[in-house]
Amino acid sequence: MKTLRLILGDQLNIKHSWFDKTDPRITYCIFETHQETDFIKHHIKKVIAFFAAMRAFASELENKGHKVIYFKIKDPNNKQTLNGNLTYLIENFNFKQFEYLLPDHYGLDKKLNAICDYLSIPSKAYDTEHFLSERFELKQFFEGKKQFIMESFYRYMRKKHDILMRDNQPEGGLWNYDKSNRKKWKARHTSPDKIDFKNDISNILTDLEDAEVVTIGRLDGHFIDFPITRFQALRQLDYFCEHLLVHFGDYQDAMHTEEINLFHSRISFALNAKLINPKECIFAVIRTYESNKDTITISQAEGFIRQILGWREYMRGMYWAQMPKFKTLNALNHNNKLPDFYWTGNTQMNCLKQSVNNSLDHAYAHHIQRLMITGNFALLNQTDPDKVDEWYLGIYADAVEWVQITNTRGMSQFADGGLIATKPYISAANYIDKMSNYCQDCTYNKKERIGENACPFNSLYWNFLDDHRETLGANRRMGMMYNLLDKIPSEEMREIKNRAHQIIINPDAY
């Protein structure tokens, strides 16, 4: 039967069983559309990375003998919507069946169901063969329970897949080595090297300019440094295991003005585009750890595995367990606008200046920069989570909704009221100083809470706790901070709140 198969931009899995053999009756279709580039403003490097990976994937399929229809953004036959392109192909090329891989995007899943109901030919959906858990496995795991604790699901996944286990117990005696993953990076340390792929994206850049695609962020030259093929992604994974894993756990939370990646793997884009899969990443790390136990401690390996087997699978499971309601949650009733400096990097607060400019330059920031700098300020500023979601989804190359919205609206902004995080992830300047060198050259004094030179994070932090006492005061994990809040003299508290309100009213002045 003449069959049309759809491949989405984050389904570039050449190891999928679909591609095990060629069939002249099957044609694969891949589309670049304004529907995807224009629903929000994306970072220029994000759009380019996906288009480059999609084009490379289409070429790989053709080289393996598969038939492919690829619509570039400026193709004259491109209807610029998923529905329009599928309808055009089916009506004009006499396809008798339509097949697709299950999307990881809730809205797109619903849209494809509707398209299939509309089409005049039979349709069938297949699993992406990527994740280590089923779409609704987490929902079933937590059925009847009041809390969705990631650690519980992580331990379940460790046992299920027999990862870092010895006689049904965690290797090393502990499930989690997070306390060993909080070292501060010192300038005297030797900076780690990285691979530079230097993918030429001149043609894509010209296409985007001709198509008048509006983007954010910065692009320096006609090259992009993300791995955009499976071969490049595997090279990056091998490089991480050989050169970076040895210190990954130690410094995974560290931030420094002279460092962008430190020991992070730089495979998140490739992983979320499905160029590589989580299982091969996990077992590559395990092999490296087991072969080098004299130099690589378990805290390095477990720290990495926890991010993929624990956090990534957990976030995906929470997405499908809580959507579509999750996308509308605003438990703290925040409605302030996102400061303009998130789009420009123009701020006197050095931690934000560094993190935002890093994001604008590279379409990348590691999880602590996202959570405890940009996310922390947005939460203390009491920003509308819709606006925060939009920024995070647009700015980062690895941001696809299932992983972005759960991290942003859930863990970062506490807009879900505690479904994902048991307390808000907020801090004053002390934590930022502990994990970075950002405070050293900042305009503001990290130790002061009031006055023109006081770090804005300090007054915003105590103001946030005071504003949300009714909601958060009974939270057991917040008890110590509320005890400290109650010890602040009333006159000083009035000054703290006054300064915080001034910042909230005009954050771009700071």
Image (cartoon, helix red, strand yellow):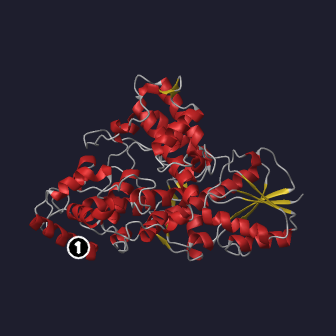
Can residue 91 be spotted in the picture? yes
Q: Nearer the viewer, residue 369 or 202?
A: 369
Can residue 267 be spotted in the picture? no
**Residue 345 pos. (x, y %):** 33, 67
Task: Decide: is 433 above or below 463.
Answer: above
**Residue 299 pos. (x, y %):** 40, 33
Task: Decide: is 34 above or below 414.
Answer: below
Q: Residue at x 24, y 64 (%)?
A: 466
Task: Decide: is 166 above or below 181.
Answer: above
Q: Residue at x 48, y 66 (%)?
A: 394
Task: Decide: is 413 above or below 169.
Answer: below
Q: Quadrant of residue 457?
A: bottom left
* Quadrant that contains the N terminus: bottom right
Label 1: which secondary element: helix
Q: Residue at x 28, y 42 (%)?
A: 184
Horizontal side of residue 213 vs 2, given as left or right: left
To which residue does mark 1 refer? 501
Q: Nearer the viewer, residue 207 or 126?
A: 126
Q: Quadrant of residue 276?
A: top right
Horizontal side of residue 113 vs 462, given as left or right: right
Q: Residue furthest front?
A: 144
Q: Quadrant of residue 373?
A: bottom left
Q: Residue furthest right?
A: 1
* Quadrant that contains the C terminus: bottom left
